[in-house]
Amino acid sequence: MGCCGSTERSKREWKPLEDRSCTDIPWLLIFIVFCIGMGCICGFAVATGAASRLVFGYDSYGNTCGQKNSKIEGIELSGEDQTQKRFVFFLDPCNIDLVNRKIKSMALCVSKCPDTELKTYSDVKKFATANESYLCSYQVPISKYTSHADRSTLCPKLPVPASKSIPMFHRCTPVDISCYTKFAEALITFVSDNSMLHRLITGVMTSREIIMGLCVLALVLSMILMVIIRYISAVLVWILTALVVLGSLGGTGVLWWLYVDHKKSLNNLIASDEVEVAKDNVQALLVYAIAATIFTVILLLLMFFMRKRVALTIALFHVAGKVFIHLPLLVFQPFWTFLALMFFWMYWIMVLLFLGTTGHPTQNEKGLVEFKMNGPLQYMTWYHAVGLIWISEFILACQQMTVAGAVVTYYFTRDKSKLPLTPILSSVFRLLRYHIGTVAKGSFIITLVKIPRLILMYIHNQLKGKENACARCMLKACICCLWCLEKCLNYLNQNAYAATAINSTNFCTSAKDAFVILVENALRVAAINTVGDFVLFLGKILIVSSTAFVGVLALNYQRDYTVWVLPLIIVCLFAFLVAHCFLSIYEIVVDVLFLCFAIDTKYNDGSPGKEYYMDKALMEFVENSRKAMKERGRGRPDSADGREMKPMAPGASSA
């Protein structure tokens, strides 16, 4: 179950795809028990009437609208038969508590929502008489609507806005959204007048067909880029290298030029105050110039020593493009993950809303009934919140394991014509049959790091403006450290899933084996994660900029309105989200290919019986590396670079 319980041999014998066995079964059982607990929370909320209170609503006396109710001890006007009163009506629907996110108003069950504005209590009385829908509290007889002493608190606030019920949730909601001006101002602080808001909304509604078309365009461009990026990766990498070198040299040169220029002008100053300021500026420029020079020298040295690792990045991008040609269903993997997350999040929000209306009825300071959970039941919400994080991470981890399994199958199948008909479905089958426990354990580790970070972020947000500078700095440092740890664990988990897909070992053993491989190839990992990530980032920028450019042309062609800002922002955000989803799959493929390549070069040397599994592009990289080593001579087999480039197996011979 734990890392210490591993009985694997210290020296790994990698046997790709040879046998399969179930991994991390105890964690599978723990995850199943946890999911049963999540289901029990939903069942408890439904059984205690929270679901019906959420859907049908309840009044301020604890009666659920649209059904018969039982008497609540100590609460008058409870236990009413509300079978004919199916809608919830708020006496002051515009009185919204932004902090607690609820309407601060008495609620009643009524048979019909007022469909026209009622300006006087006489109008309220006429509406009640005509429709048998009583808008004042139950203890106020209809004959007293215009004369009751407490009508200001027991009857609706005038004027009563026209309203209609929300579909499925039976709440009377004002038709005129200007009722929620305060709420809108809290959400949209940058809008200074209603005309601007109106123009923005009109722009979005008028251009909805263009927005949908541009979103589809971003989707198509992302799919195309995943296939053609292998042809342009070399150009992008060398453009990136040239920009970095020229930018660092140019920036350093400008700083030295500014230092010399300011030093010359210092001699022409007379006033003592100006001289002091100029001296400080010259001193600061000297420090900046020296720091930039050191940075540039280090950067150039790194670029020089890592130039061959950059060639490996290009080769991996080339092979990744071939993977998507042989495994076209990989392109649709983000869709299934997105759908799974959406369904789970919808279920989670539904249960959370149930929990908001479950519990025991209690009276607040105004005498109105609210349902609150007391004792151990209040911890169900925390359990539910942990479930959100763990199961979301579990779904994302399933995507990583599925992609890793398919790529491993592709890499370690020598004859590509013998690949399974659908490697993605085969990978899903292996995941469900053998490795769900491993995915559950890996996602739980991420959850353990994410929860403290979210708690610290919540504390930091609550104490904003109250804590001292030292406490604020410590909180931010802790949040940053936990974020970095989470990113590192995510990367290690991804490689652990790939190792599990290769050798069918448990999570801890796979993580240890993957970590050893990554440490042995640290420089290559650094090159791939810097150059490769930047190339993918350029791909995202390319998709967003192309979509935005087409959007500007389309919006210019349609001249029905002048405000383009909101439609373009919506399109660009969607384009970046789509590009990120698709290219993150590409990134996973590249990382898994690298782990397979590192294992291949470590345990195979091309000799009979130890033939390479790698693609031709990677084979060319190995051959070029060997040729470069021979040109430098064979007298340095123990050098760091030699270990990095030669096939890492005893008795290696030329392939």
Image (cartoon, rainbow, N blue to C red):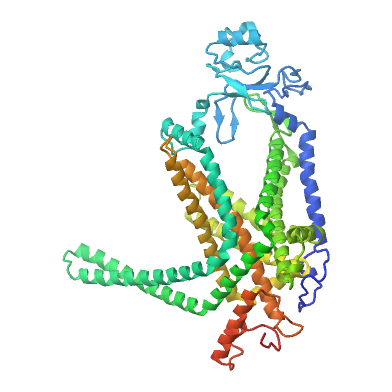
Can you give x and y, in whole percent of width and height, for residue 563 in the image? 42, 38
The C terminus sits in image quarter:
bottom right
Which residue is more in the foreground, 585 or 292?
A: 585
Query: Which is more toward the observer, 1 or 149?
Result: 1
Instruction: State the residue at coordinates (46%, 44%).
Output: 554
Q: Where is residue 542 shown, x and y percent of the image?
A: 50, 57
* Viewport quadrant of the N terminus: bottom right
Spot occupied by residue 196 in the image (x, y as percentages of width and height):
42, 34
Tell which of 20 and 186 is nearer to you. Answer: 20
Q: Position of residue 271 (x, y in %)?
A: 17, 63
**Any part of residue 461 in sight:** no
What number of labels is visible?
0
Q: Is residue 107 above or below residue 560?
A: above
Residue at x-position 46% and y-position 68%: 239
Residue at 32% x, 69% y is 254
Q: Residue furthest top?
A: 143
Q: Tell me where residue 431 sits by quadrant.
A: bottom right
Res. 260 image quadrant = bottom left
Image check: 477 left or right of 646?
Answer: left
**Residue 578 seen in the figure:** yes
As displayed, is residue 8 above or below residue 78? below
Residue at the limit of the structure toward the front, as seen here: 417
Q: Taking 625 as reference, is 604 left or right?
A: right
Position of residue 66 in the picture relative to residue 451 (left or right): right
